[in-house]
Every structure is written in C-alpha cells, then in structure tokens.
Image (spheres, rainbow, N blue to C red):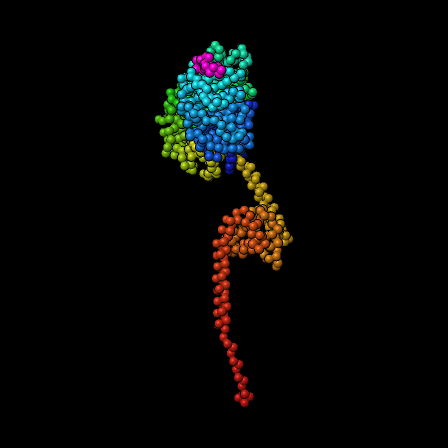
Amino acid sequence: MAEPVAGVGRFKANYAVERKIEPFYKGGKVQLDQTGQHLFCICGTRVNILDVASGAVLRSLEQEDQEDITAFDLSPDDEVLVTASRALLLAQWAWREGSITRLWKAIHTAPVATMAFDPTSTLLATGGCDGAVRVWDVVRHYGTHHFRGSPGVVHLVAFHPDPARLLLFSSAADSTIRAWSLQDQSCLAVMTAHYSAVTSLTFSADGHTMLSSGRDKICVVWDLRSHQATRTVPVFESVEAAVLLPEEPAPELGVKSKRLHFLTAGDQGVLRVWEAASGQCVHTQRQRPGPGQELTRCALARSAGLLLSVTADHNLLLYETRSLQLQKQFAGYSEEVLDVRFLGPEDSHIVVASNSPSLKVFELQTMACQILHGHTDIVLALDVFRKGWLFASCAKDQSICIWKMNKAGKVACVAQGSGHTHSVGTICCSRLKETFLVTGSQDCTVKLWPVPEALLSKGPAPHSGPVLLQAQATQRCHDKHINSVAVAPNDKLLATGSQDRTAKLWALPQCQLLGVFSGHRRGLWCVQFSPMDQVLATASADGTVKLWALQDFSCLKTFEGHDASVLKVAFVSRGTQLLSSGSDGLVKLWTIKNNECVKTLDAHEDKVWGLHCSRLDDRAVTGASDSCVILWKDVTEVEQAEEQARREEEVVKQQELDNLLHEKRYLRALGLAISLDRPHTVLTVIQAIRRDPEACEKLGATVLRLRRDQKEALLRFCITWNTNSRHCHEAQAVLGVLLRHEAPEELLAYQGMQASLEALLPYTERHFQRLSRTLQAATFLDFLWHSMKLPPLPAAPALAPSAL
C-alpha cells in the first residue's frame, strides 16, 4: 500500500451524535390545535407534540403504565389533552408542561377506541371496544352517562356543535349512526344509510346538517332536525375522512357559491372537493405516482385555515384550506432506512431512502422535509454527484432516477431510465466529472449510463418532464446478485462486489475485467476505493473488512471486530482511517496503519444500512433498520482541546497545592485536593497535616471547616483508604473527627451514608482485630522479656593482702 500523502490531518478519535431523526408517528389519530401551531399524533406508547413551524418534537407524553396509547383528544380550547391506554386508564394532561393532572380508570371492559370533547371543553365522550359509550365531566371529575346498545367496537363519537342541544353521535360495527340525548339519557335515533364502517362525522356551522363518510364509497348528508338522510353522494372510493369546507367561495377549489361543499380523503390518495347539493366533484388534486399514497386521515383546523392529511406511508401533509396549496411535509415513520446521503455543495441537506417508493429530503438547519415521488417500488440505494446538486436513486421497480436540487433547496426528478430485468440494488456516480453513473442489479449485470448534457445546465429543472436515460454499456459481472459498485476517483476503474464472495475490478468505459479479489468467506455488501491510495476496501457478511492492492489484487489488511455482517465501509481522514457499519447496529472507526479499532459508536438498535461522510470530512450520517437517521459530528479536536485544557488546569492546581502545603495552609489545600477528585492527593494532604506537631487539633479544625459536599467526598475517599492497612490510620483519623464532632442526625443526612457505613465497618473491624493481635503479641513479648531477666550476680570477695 502506498504511504499516505504528506499534510494529512490528525487521526479521528471519536464521533458524537449531533442530531437524530426518529419516527414520531406510527399510525392512528392526528390532530392540529386551533392555532395550527402544534400537531398531536400517536407513536406507540406516546403522544408526540410537534411544532408545525420547525417539525421538531416539543414534547413526548407517555402514561405511567407505559402501555400503547389507543385514543386521545385535545379540547376545543386547546387547554386539556386526554389520552387512553391499553391498561384501561385515562390520563388528563397539562400538555404544555408535560404533566398529568388526573388519572382515572376508564371503567370500559376493553380498550377505549375513540374519544371526543364537547364544544365547551367540559364533557368528554369515550367509545370502547366493549360497545359502550361513556361521558365524563373533566372539570368536576366524574362520569355523567353510560350508553349501551352499540354492537361491537364503538370507533367513532362526536358531540353536536351546539352545546345547548346536548346531543352525542356514535357509530359502531353495525355501520349505523346513533344519536344520544344527554338530557333524556336515551337513544334518540338510529340512522341507517351506510353499508360499511362509518369513518367520520362532521357538522355544518348552523348545526342543522351532518355529513357522514364510509368505506362503502358514499357520503351521506343528514338533516339533524328529522334525523333523515337528505342526500347520498357516491364518491367512488373508500373514504377515510370527510370534512365540511367553510361556507364561502373558493375559486381555486371550484367552490363558486356559499352552498355546502365537502372534501374527501380516501384510498385513491387524492383530496377531492364535492358539492353536496348536486353530488358533483368540483375539484380533484393531482395524483402522485407510486403506492402507499392512500390517505388514512384528514383533519381541519378552521381558525388557522389549515388542512392536514396522512398517507398510508405515515407522511403528514399540511395544506392551506382555501387553495390546497402544500405548506409543509412531515415524514412520520421511515420504517427501515436503506440508504442516506449528504446533499448540496455544503452538505446542507440529507436524502433518505427507506422501505418506501418515496424519498425524503431534510434540510439540516430547519429540518424541513420534502417527500419525492418518482419510483413505483422500494428505493434501494442512492448516490450523489461531485458538486452535490445532482443525485441518483435506484429501486426495486428496475428503474433509476436522477434528481436535481435548485438553490432554493427544492428537488425535482430530471431523468429516468430502465433496462435492468431485476431489482437495481446499487448505484454509483462518476467522481471526477458529472458524466456518467453505474448501476448493479440482481440480474448480475452492470450498466453504464451517460448523463445528458441538458441536466448539467445551471438553470432550473426542465418543465417538459424527466429526460430518458439510455445505457451505454452492459456487462454481466458476477454469478450472483451484485450488492455494490464503486467508481474510482479518476473515473477509469470500476469495482463490483457480489453475493458470490468476490469483488472484481473493471476498466471503464468498456467494462473490461482487470482482476478478481478473492478471500472473503461470505458475500460482499460494499466496495469502496481509497481517495488517496491505490487500494480497495471491501465489507463482507463474514464480519470483516479487507483492504486490497489494486496492482496485484493481494489482501493487505483484514479488520475484524463486528459480530455480524459488515454492510457499509467508507474512507475518512484522507484515506488513513475507515468507518464501517454492520448488522450488529454498531459503527466502528478504524486506523488503517495499526489495524486498531479506535472507537465503537453504539446508537442504533438494528442493521446500519446507510453510511456517508461529508465533503469536509467532519460529519457522517447513518441510517438503520430501527428507522432512525443519525448525524454524527467529529469531536476529536474538541475533545483534545478539552483534554489539553484539563491537563493544564491540573498542572496549575497541582502547583498551587504544593505551594499551599509548603505554606501550611491546610484548609485551602484540602479543599483544592478534593475538587481535583483524586483520593491519593487528598491522602497526601491528610498525611502532611498529621506530620504537623499539633496534628490532632489541626486535622479536626481543618476537616470541620469543610463544606458538606467536601465532607461527603472525603468520606468516600476514606472508604478507599480504609481498605489498605498502610493508609487506614488516616481514614480512621478523619472518621474519628467526624464521629466526635458531627451530630448523628447530620451524619445520617450525608449522601450515601448507609452504603459508606456498610463499606467501612468490615475493614475497620479487621484493622482493630489486627491491632488487638499486635497488642497481645507486644504484651507477651514484654512478659517474656521480664521473665528472661537474670538475677544480678553476687560481688566477688576481695583478696587479703597476705595472699599477695
């Protein structure tokens, strides 16, 4: 492998999560507040509250039982939110603060399927899967009514808009609409006109007319004075929601009079406006291509003039009511993210391919979302051209698309091509110039597609429609599915990776085979050229990443560390490091020179299919099967600067500590040592105090003048010292000071005092036992010494002079 070029920046050491795009809506009810500023939607066990302007989740409300939310409703005055869970509990929320103000049992014998407030925001009706309808007074906190008689699940309840009439309407599995009188506590009428489930009820401004929609492809206009159907409008689609439009002219929607008009949303995936009197469709929205466009919900915020519709793909579309002009798009749930790429010359956007025919483009600064339609089946892979304005996608529908982003950030499809006979699973754009792209398919072939000159103009996208792409060359490359293709930085080489466990190198543009890279034990998921060296990286299902020399096709290095398939690999730090992502949900950073795994990033919970690095090499983006897209930021320099600052601060503090000890200013020295959070340094200070001739008085005076948090830290350090017989005397001296001078109540109030006592007692007992044994041994030695003393010898007699 060639040596890295001079001037390469420092190695990366760590990435941190900068932003996370998570699912916020997984189906169910959606609702706008009256101002149109907040959007409420269900996501499993939570109700998420979105800021409509930014698309950010402001609050996520979850009941204490942590069960799935089955229904919710926001009061007309926007003050009270009530949620119902599978645990048969109802929770009343002060949603702006995110707190539960009241929790009570629903009394239903099965989960609550629907709920609705009355116009005064004081009464709440709940419809259950047990066929019962209950009414609650949320102000006085008691149940007011219990209506029986509906067969099966009550999936729809609605109050009459005139609170003086005290009427409640419900619909259950028998496709009828029941009108209940709260005053008489009885069923006033059973209205029969639908032959399938009734999906919505909406009322006119004067309260005399009601509109119902159903999955039997009709909408019925009812006179509420007689409870009779006055008109049945065939709409020729299964309707999931119908709303009555404001009774004022709206020429852009074909509404030319003040007569009753309503809007329907259903399985055809378009919003349509109907005149109730004549039953004619006066406006139809333009159809979007691809499946998953069926509309499942529709809600109107009258005072804000906004209309919200929801697609089967969990995309939320916000329109201006009078013109049906699209205002905002939100991607509620991406399911399985299959690929991600940075977009724009400055990586200002990201494009996400998920388990859907549509693409999602997010602006990173504002998180504004665009949903792109062009494919008719799941998009499998993405790639971006050098300048960032053009990108390409390929899909299961055997087609490819080229998309162009203008300077305003709007994206349009500018070219389409087809020619493969199976799913197109991988795509790669030319690197040097925006001249061609290469695709690989399950039909075991690779195709080379020239980019038409018209697409490279700086002007807006052509209005005549997408340009048709024609393949310039086709080559059968492998015996099994081609999972990855990569174009070399000079646009002269092509690498392919296949399920047949090999990678191959080809010369462009003729697609001539130059060599085969063999060595992996299982299929290859990704191939990638080094930006600096003549090296190819391959990622395989055998859990390894390998580097290969392009000159002789030999394996240079093998990186092992993933517990499962490695799905993506990318070069960073100018070709000196690698990022890899795997089926184990991990992203790993490798240094090539020493084969070392520098960092493992664990933020995903499932297979990480998408991995891409920014142009400046300071950020990365990953997408996984957990439907999360994570933006990572290189924090190596920040962490190194913090570490350097910390070291410098420690050096300064250590010098200050030495000076304080030298000057015998023990209180400040002890406080400084504790702030450094280094038990050994604190021990050194205690030992210095104990060496002083007036040790006892000075130790007591110093310890007692510490703050309470410092005393708690000192007690934690004592636990460490007390485990060592050489340092136990300092620990016991500090404990002695605290026990003699602190009241028991104050000591018990210390944080973690119980655990501290449990840790101190065994070692303290052991130290005292050792001291007792030492004392006994010393006493015995003293006894032996005294017993072994010989009696004094008698003095020798003096010799007589005569003897001399």
**Which part of the image, by quadrant, shows the C terminus?**
bottom right
Residue shown at the point (62%, 48%) measured from the top left: 656
Identify the image quadrant of residue 235: top left
Dominant SS in magenta: strand
Q: Is residue 582 magenta?
A: no
Measured along the vertical axis of the image, is residue 768 above or below residue 288? below
Residue shown at the point (49%, 21%) measured from the top left: 167
Q: Is residue 726 visible?
A: yes
Measured along the vertical axis of the image, is residue 183 above or below residue 540? above
Q: Residue furthest bottom?
A: 802
In depth, the one of 64 and 667 nearer the eye is 64
Q: Position of residue 15 (x, y in %)?
A: 51, 35
Q: Is residue 226 magenta?
A: yes
Q: Residue furthest front?
A: 184
Q: Position of residue 799 (x, y in %)?
A: 53, 86
Q: Which residues are magenta?
A: 217-235
